């Protein structure tokens, strides 16, 4: 049942109506005849035209008319809401069953230069999760090495919990002596190997490429890579360059989507604006050269753009039948009906007091 609580609310409204009727009826019957409501019994008067034209009487008549108009309007609302619910309002959506054959890896750079930017990226990832229905999604984080936080799964609640946990851990300023650094190092212990480097984007992307399972199955695969592309590798220990990792992803039939974001305050003091521009342009060029799409992290349309492209591209790639889903959506009509009934009961009770 779409709204299991609705019958209980309607039953409560009915009981309230019965209670008000009994209580107010008893109160009315307890008053002496002709003295109900604390006023004298009505007396017929001759030549009452001047009385009816007096300001107090005219004001009372206007209030009475407004009350009757409100009751009539609410009655129409009740009838309309009842008719809408009886007509079973529905939402019709079309979805290709090919989308359930889609695997997506969220590939997140968690180096300290990304701490402030990752909050926006995690918001984008959460928006993406809200649009998925049956797709398998995994989460891999990386710095000098990669760590799989969530393997491919369609358990979106688990993914949301993990994204929230990561967001909480990254909600700090990475300065020496900050106790939050302990949580950071503990949560992402797998991203700090023996490699003397940081934000090794090529190795991170290659690790995300290797995170896909079911290689023999006909499934669409995509990586959403989020990074500032600020590689610190003074000892040349990175195995894959960004170009080589993108080549590997393309060989495996994996579509690449890139989210770029950088906070100058978090970067090495020796990093210039020219260095930032060079890193951004490299990420964009490599992504586009491999048939992917590039987005800025502060682009409000990033999530919707990625979803639209994923669906259009991968339905075409895999094919599949279109499934039409019809879902009952009585919520708006039911809530409107309930509100109208309660207000109508309130006006009726006020009128009888």
Image: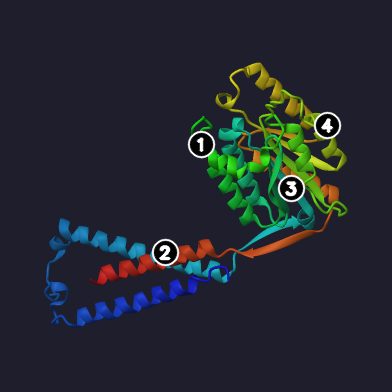
The answer to whether residue 108 shows anywhere in this view is no
Residue 339, numbered circle: 2
298 or 241: nearer the eye? 241
First along the sequence among labels 2 and 3: 3
Q: Which residue is mark 1?
A: 172
**Mark toward the start of the polypeptide (4 vs 1):** 1
Q: Which numbered tag is attached to residue 104?
A: 3
Q: Please tell me which residue lies in front, 163 or 313.
A: 163
Q: Horizontally, is 222 left or right of 328 in the view?
A: right
CA–CA distance between discs 4 and 1? 33 Å
> CB under 8 Å between callouts 2 and 4?
no
Image quadrant containing the N terminus: bottom right
- Residue 321 in view in this figure: yes
Q: Which residue is the site of mark 4?
A: 244
Rendered view: 277 above or below 175: above
Mark 1 lies on a secondary structure that is loop
Q: Quarter of the image holding residue 276?
A: top right
Between discs 4 and 3, the one toward the N terminus: 3
Residue that appears at 81% across and 34% down: 246
Where residue 190 sits: x, y (%)? 67, 43
- Name the residue located 72 percent from the left edge and 57 percent from the top edge: 134
Instruction: Look at the numbered discs 4 and 3 and tell me whether their residues touch, using CB distance below 8 Å.
Output: no
Q: Position of residue 306 (x, y in %)?
A: 70, 41
Helix, strand or loop at label 2? It is: helix
Q: Is residue 126 left or right of residue 194?
A: left
Alpha carbons under labels 2 and 3: distance apart:
44 Å
Spatial distance from mark 4 to mark 3, Cα to Cα? 20 Å
* Mark 1 neighbour class, 10 Å CA radius: few under 14, some 14 to 19, many 20 or more: some
In the picture, which quadrant includes the C terminus?
bottom left
The front one of 81 and 212 is: 212
Q: Earlier in the sequence, mark 2 or mark 4?
A: 4
């Amino acid at each position: 049942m779409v709204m299991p609580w609705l019958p209980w609310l309607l039953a409560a409204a009915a009981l309230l109506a019965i209670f008000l009727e009994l209580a107010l009826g008893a109160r009315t019957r307890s008053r002496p005849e002709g003295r109900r409501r604390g006023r004298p019994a009505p007396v017929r008067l001759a030549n009452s035209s001047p009385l009816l034209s007096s300001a107090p009487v005219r004001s009372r008549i206007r209030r009475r008319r407004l009350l009757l108009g409100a009751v009539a309007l609410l009655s129409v609302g009740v009838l309309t809401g009842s008719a809408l619910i009886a007509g079973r309002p529905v939402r019709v959506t079309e979805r290709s069953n090919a989308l359930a054959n889609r695997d997506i890896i969220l590939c997140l750079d968690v180096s300290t230069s990304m701490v402030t930017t990752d909050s926006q990226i995690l918001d984008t990832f959460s928006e993406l999760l809200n649009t998925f229905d049956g797709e398998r999604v995994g989460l891999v984080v990386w710095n000098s090495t990669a760590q799989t936080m969530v393997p491919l799964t369609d358990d979106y609640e688990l993914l949301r919990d993990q994204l929230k946990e990561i967001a909480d851990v990254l909600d700090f300023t990475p300065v020496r002596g900050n106790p939050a650094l302990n949580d950071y190092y503990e949560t992402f212990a797998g991203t700090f190997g023996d490699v003397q480097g940081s934000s090794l984007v090529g190795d991170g992307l290659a690790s995300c490429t290797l995170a896909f399972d079911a290689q023999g199955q006909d499934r669409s695969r995509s990586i959403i890579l989020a990074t500032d592309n600020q590689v610190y590798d003074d000892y040349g220990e990175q195995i894959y360059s960004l170009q080589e990792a993108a080549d590997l992803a393309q060989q495996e039939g994996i579509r690449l989507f890139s989210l770029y974001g950088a906070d100058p305050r978090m970067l090495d003091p020796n990093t210039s604006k020219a260095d930032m521009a060079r890193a951004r342009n490299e990420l964009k060029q490599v992504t586009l050269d491999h048939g992917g799409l590039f987005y800025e992290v502060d682009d409000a349309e990033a999530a919707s753009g990625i979803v639209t492209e994923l669906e259009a591209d991968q339905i075409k790639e895999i094919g599949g039948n279109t499934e039409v889903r019809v879902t009952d959506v009585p919520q708006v009509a039911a809530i409107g009906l309930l509100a109208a009934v309660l207000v109508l009961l309130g006006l009726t009770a006020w009128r009888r007091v």
